[in-house]
Image: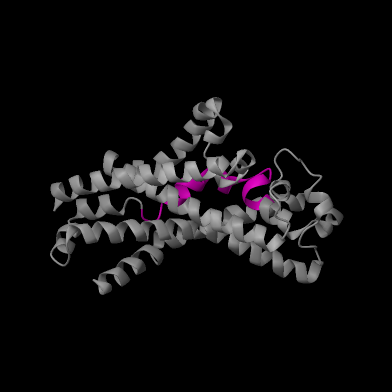
Amino acid sequence: MSQYIKEELKRAFLSRTTIATAFIAIILMVIGVTDSFQLDSYWLKHQSIFYLFVWGFTEGSSPYLLLLFPMISAIPFAASLISDSKSGMSKYIALRMERKRYLQIKFFINALVGGFVLMIGPLVGLIALLIMKIFNHNPMLAMEVEKGFNLSTSTGQLFFDIGIESVWLMIVILLANLFIQGMVFSTFALGMSTVIQNKYLTLVLPLGYLIFSGTVLATIHPNLYIVAIYNLSSLRDGIQWWLGSVLFYLSLGSILYVIGGKIIAEKYV
């Protein structure tokens, strides 16, 4: 079984699809950050690394990663159960291990790779910004800017409001949240894949749900828009909104996967 786990990890993290998705996430982060370069050089030189970092994936005028994050999370591995079942690979695997163990491994590896591809873009962007800091001498955090810019949406202001003023702790929390959201929505997509049983719809459905949550659910409450847990804005109304949303989507995806996974396994194995 350990050999199968190694093979599945290699398949999940080193596949062309995963590498391409990670590259796309990095490009989207670069686009988001470089959008700020259109402003004057004086502003850029004196802006904080934290602000440029956040600008790249959530607050900027070109936050493409924010708009595509559910689909980015799902692309690498969420449709793998359907692909394995329809290609006959699951029948071969069933000869080597019990079905329950196979489904468990698939579940956890999908969550890990989903978190990885969503976090890698901002992480690489942060490293690039820290290298820029060596030559440009940008401050890590400009409190007077973070506290004064767009107070209704500023991520820096959000952290100050809940008592966090360490820039490194802010960055760690943001990166950890990206990894968690990647895990959550790759799991959500994996669970939905067992219902729709179409690998292409599995990849598109998360994007459709983002649009639905932003146009329909957000009219009920702004925190029902899934972007509110991606950019942590739901924390303004208490951690219960963020935690409740994460647990809801994770539980829904898990339940659908457990039920649908057994049905698919019985159908194709």
Q: Is 189 left, or right, of 95 in this rendering?
A: right
User: Residue shown at 55%/46% (left/top)?
Assistant: 230
Q: Camera-side residue: 266 or 246?
A: 246
Image quadrant assignment for residue 123:
bottom right
Q: Is residue 10 above or below residue 192?
A: below
Expressed as whole percent of the image width and height from the top left, the position of residue 128 reads: 67, 66
Expressed as whole percent of the image width and height from the top left, the position of residue 106 reads: 30, 58
Question: Can you see residue 24?
Answer: no
Q: Residue furthest right?
A: 42
In this picture, which residue range is highlighted in magenta? 55-77
Q: Is residue 73 magenta?
A: yes
Expressed as whole percent of the image width and height from the top left, the position of residue 32 reads: 65, 50
What's the magenta bit mostly, secondary-structure-wise? helix
Expressed as whole percent of the image width and height from the top left, the position of residue 252 reads: 36, 42
Q: Is 245 left, or right, of 142 in this rendering?
A: left
User: Residue shown at 37%/45% (left/top)?
Assistant: 251
